[in-house]
Amino acid sequence: MGSFCSRQKPYNEADAEENEQAEEIERRIARETKAEQHIHKLLLLGESGKSTIFKQIKLLFQTGFDEAELGSYTSVIHANVYQTIKILFDGAKELAQNESDSSKYVVSCENKDVGEKLSDIGSRLDYPYLTKEIADEIKTLWNDAAIQEAYSRGNILQVPDCAQYFMENLERLSETDYVPTKEDVLYARVRTTGVVEIQFSPVGESRKSGEVYRLYDVGGQRNERRKWIHLFEGVRAVIFCAAISEYDQMLFEDEMKNRMMETKELFDWVLKQACFEKTSFMLFLNKFDIFEKKVQKVPLNVCEWFRDYQPMASGKQEVEHAYEFVKKKFEGLYFQSTKPERVDRVFKIYRTTALDQKLVKKTFKLVDETLRRRNLIEAGLL
């Protein structure tokens, strides 16, 4: 009998060890579940500027980009340069054929061959490293009067906002040991596809009392929207980015569709989703830096939604007047698209410039304060 018990002992120890492991797994799951309950999910939606906001959060509230991550943007930035000069050269040729004052869009004879060469490079799937020689050719073409005229028609040609910044920094971008700066990364343009996420606290990691957020950035293009559905449940707030400077531009995917009209329709659609009945809405009226320059040259009422706009002043006063008009349009759309039983959900509008780090930091601290106050009200503490 004694020998039987001694033979059984290893099995009992094995069972105990297995049970202990199972209990540890259960404890870990419980801890992770509890931790998840304190993480607020934010959904970043809209048509333009979302990716820059996302990168700013990484710089502001996380450790930023390490050298390897910065280096990974080199090919992206070089691609942006090649794509931009191709858009401008091809656009100048198109304008020269179709516009009544066509002569001002004709590239000078000495730059035509260079333009054709760069346009060909911009058509490739793999772009070469930006050398000093190619950078000098791009700079020469960029300074051509016809290319500058084409650049002034950027709203029609789909010229990216990063164009001037990268063209002014060609010499640095083409250095053999070039490593992108944080500012370069913010200007870099990569179309978001699928879903990316980041976890952060606007008050910093040293403050334990701060709320923790998990922000999801989803593809803004039409064919990406069907991928959002599984993220809708449990969202604490929707941050919707609307590029107010794009009121005179057309969609990349559909050149017959005004970007502001598309933004209006998307915002209206998001507001009406049943899963957002109790969700807070933070509207970022983005790209104000571009808007304040453009609105003094391009009438706001070129956009169908803003047909009833009447300019009343000039300079800074006109900028503020135009901004308040756009803001009221979005406010009106919000209340028009919100059922009476949902009007108590939080709705805030913020003027933003995604490239302005100080402004983005201030904005997210205001968003944090708003959501924390909402939490206290729901808990009956306010």
Image (cartoon, rainbow, N blue to C red):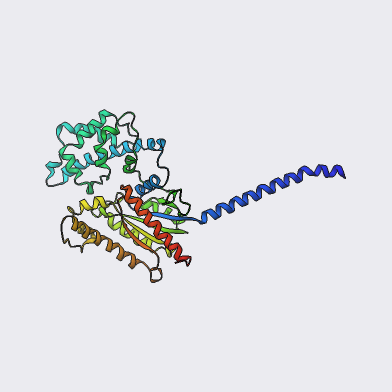
- Viewer-closest of 129 and 326: 326
Indicate left or right for 129 with 17 as reference.
Answer: left
- Viewer-closest of 223 and 64: 64
Q: Position of residue 112 (x, y in %)?
A: 18, 33
Residue drawn at (25%, 28%) of the image: 133
Q: Position of residue 120 (x, y in %)?
A: 27, 34
Q: Position of residue 58 (x, y in %)?
A: 40, 45
Q: In the rendered view, would you say 143 is above or below 32?
A: above
Outermost bottom residue: 340
Q: In the rendered view, would you say 83 is above or below 225?
A: above
**Image mark count:** 0
Indicate left or right for 267 with 38 as reference.
Answer: left
Outermost right residue: 1
Among the 4 quarters of the image, the one containing residue 281: bottom left
Q: Quadrant of the N terminus?
A: top right
Among the 4 quarters of the image, the one containing residue 338: bottom left
- Viewer-closest of 326 and 376: 376
Residue drawn at (18%, 44%) of the image: 95
Q: Position of residue 212 (x, y in %)?
A: 46, 53
Residue drawn at (47%, 54%) of the image: 209
- Viewer-closest of 276 and 156: 276
Q: Quadrant of the C terminus?
A: bottom left
